[in-house]
Image (spheres, helix red, strand yellow):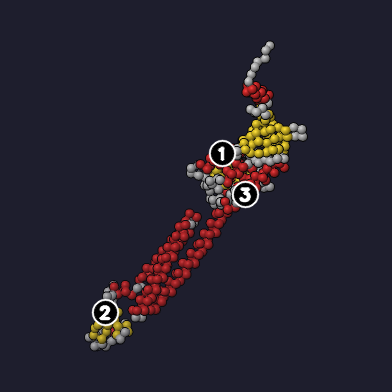
Amino acid sequence: MTPQIITVSQFLSIVNETLKYAFPEVIIEGEVSGFKVNQGKFVFFDLKDNDNVLSCFMMLHQLRLPIEDGMKVRVTGHAKVTKVSRFSLTVKAIEFAGEGELKRAMEILKQRLESEGLFSEARKRPLPPFPQRIGLITSGTSAAYADFIKIINARWGGIEILLADVTVQGPTAPDQLVGALEYFNQLSPPVDAVAMIRGGGSLEDLQAFSTEQVARAVASSRAPIIVGVGHEIDFSLADYAADLRAATPTDAARLIVPDRTEILARIDHRERRLTTGINQQIMQLQGRLERSVSLLGNYLRLPRERIQQHESALRLNLERLKALQSRTEQTIRSYNARMDLSFRYKLSRDSERLETLARLLHGYDPTAVLKRGYAIVRKDNRVIQSSDQVQKQDAVVIQLAKGSLEATVKETHS
């Protein structure tokens, strides 16, 4: 039988189809050697053991954590013969063969991102004190999710929580975490804060939160973000990039919302202090007003110039009293939502008392008395209160509401 003649390209295609059929996907462990990146997107390296070397190729965006020569890794991919007849492994994913290698890769990436200022304290923003909408990134079936919701409702409640249900470990986890952050960044209206959480696990289980793409996505979050991954001793690169790091998922819930009991106690304390302060000021002003009224009574018999001086002082005190009343009302309005009805009633009653005192003070105005038809009679600048104080033909001055009259006494009657 005459063998079939085929071209080189056809032969390589047959070989590659055979390899793809025989080994659709393999996982190979070895040591990295000759690592390099071409044109900013193509990754080439060799995978070797004690006896052999295997050429590997992958795209840079598939590299979740940095690798370097000497690292022991497990690569997932399929075999292929290139156009120049070179046997190569096209890599889909890389895992580190141990925690030591993973820590080494994380430290390399951490130093690089830190040198870019990605973890700088100057970039970090405070969480809002009273968030109304929270974006939550985690697995919706996890214990971390249940604990987070339980603590949020116990501490504050009434908060809208938008869940982005994602895979939190495995090869697809980084893309899902980044996609969830992009979703919250584009949401309108935006969330007040974002929480990214997951429960404990090994360093490899938490690896998705230490990839470069996740760290950069956390750092560029539109809303302030808190990350609580693993246990208190666990640290991920997302922790460093976040605005706030929580030791655990439950700690994240405690940090993102205030404690309702503590806030109410604080409001009650401030309300008592405000009430006491206002009452003290009102009592002081009331005392000053009473003293002013008493002094006014003592000076009613003095010349008009002295009366006008005290009248001016009283008006100034009255204006200050009204200004204080205005400031007091503004302060009360700002706390009105937290004040009870008894406090509002007391403040209203005290305001009425102040107005009553002001009207009483106005009633002592001597010019008002003159306007009602009364007059002040003087002889030699002394106020005449009895007809016995004057004699026939004495000259007197009669002060009216407007102007004065000079008169001569014709007769006197007891």
Give whichever of discs 3 and 1 has the lower sequence position: 3
| Viewer-side residue, 412 vs 397 | 397
Which dot marks residue 179? 1
| Viewer-side residue, 136 vs 206 | 206
> Could you tell me residue 206's position as x and y percent?
66, 41
Mark 3 surroundings within 10 Å by alpha-carbon count, few (fewer than 14), some (14 through 19), many (20 or more): few
| Residue in the picture at 62% in, 47% down | 113
Which dot marks residue 404? 2
Give whichever of discs 1 and 2 has the lower sequence position: 1
Residue type pointed to by label 1: Gly
| Residue in the picture at 50% in, 55% down | 338
Which dot marks residue 115? 3
Residue type pointed to by label 3: Ser
Q: Is residue 216 left or right of residue 379?
A: right
User: SS of the residue at dot 2?
Assistant: strand
Do residues under tags 3 and 2 come within 8 Å of each other at their CB atoms?
A: no
| Viewer-side residue, 41 vs 312 | 41
Question: Disc 3 versus disc 2: distance between alpha carbons?
Answer: 91 Å
Which dot marks residue 1? none
Q: Residue furthest right?
A: 50
User: Where 19 falls versus 259 (above or below)?
Assistant: above
Give whichever of discs 3 and 2 has the lower sequence position: 3
Residue type pointed to by label 2: Ser
Q: Residue furthest top?
A: 1
